Image (cartoon, rainbow, N blue to C red):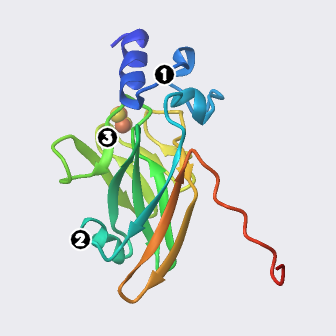
Amino acid sequence: MSKQTKTIRRRDALKVLGCGTCAIAAVSSGCTFSELYSDFEGEAVDVDLGRARYQDLQTVGEMVALDVGPVKLNLIRTDEATLVAIERICPHLGEDMAPIGSSPTARGMYMNGQLWCTAHGSYFDLEGMVVGGPTNSPIQVFPVRFTPEPSGGFATVYVGVAPPVDNAEGES
Ligand code: FES
């Protein structure tokens, strides 16, 4: 496969608009979020783990795919108190690292604290850095605020927008 073909596939997978020269190594080559998703203003998404759609995330080690506008990511329950939101389009050839079985094209697994693209064996840590496999490009991680509760818990995922700044303690 030619480099040009790979670039186009990556661009298509990311719905890249306006950062054409750095599409295949989007994150590592310095493209900003707004360059990658220029038609998308960003969004904060609320996730209720009590809903059937997200119920798997009540179990540590589970992963659920979530689309926020054009941005495709996985939510991963990494421990009792933590949800990680991480890009799920593999920078190697653009395969979807959604949990295997969640769709016919899903190629992702969460295993041993890493996100694995089973298409050709790229591994990423939970900061999005490449651990192994054929890609050299990291993936993006998004801020999450998560409040676990006995019935599941609630999270807000900030995609392309910054979380609000907390007031200092004691400030009125
Ligand atoms: S597309 Fe993920 S490793 Fe090739």
In the rendered structure, the answer to whether residue 168 lies left or right of residue 112 reads right
Q: Quadrant of the C terminus?
A: bottom right
Find the residue positioned furthest to the bottom: 150
**Which of pointers 1 and 2 lies earlier in the amino acid sequence?**
1
Residue picked out by circle 2: 52
Q: Secondary structure at mark 3?
A: strand
Label 1 to label 3: alpha-carbon separation: 19 Å
Q: Is residue 7 visible?
A: yes
Residue picked out by circle 3: 96
- Tell me whether circle 1 and circle 2 mark residues in contact (CB < 8 Å): no
User: Measured along the vertical axis of the image, is residue 17 above or below residue 131?
Assistant: above
Q: For the residue with label 1, is its CB less than 8 Å from the closest atom of ligand 1?
A: no
Q: For the residue with label 2, is its CB less than 8 Å from the closest atom of ligand 1?
A: no
Residue 70 in the image, given as x and y percentages of width and height: 40, 37
Identify the residue at horizontal 30%, vertical 44% (top origin): 118
Q: Which amino acid is tagged 3? A: Asp
- Tell me whether circle 1 and circle 3 mark residues in contact (CB < 8 Å): no
Q: Dividing the image into four quarters, tell me where ligand 1 lies.
A: top left
Residue 150 in the image, given as x and y percentages of width and height: 39, 89
Q: Residues within 10 Å of mark 1 (few under 14, many from 20)?
A: some
Label 2 to label 3: alpha-carbon separation: 22 Å
Q: Secondary structure at mark 1?
A: loop
Q: Which amino acid is tagged 1? A: Leu
Front-most of residues 60 and 48:
48
Q: Which amino acid is tagged 2? A: Ala
Find the residue positioned furthest to the right: 171
In the rendered structure, the answer to whether residue 119 lies left or right of residue 89 reads left
Q: Secondary structure at mark 2?
A: helix
Residue 104 in the image, given as x and y percentages of width and height: 15, 43
Q: Is residue 128 visible?
A: no
Disc number lying in front (1 or 3): 1
Residue picked out by circle 1: 17
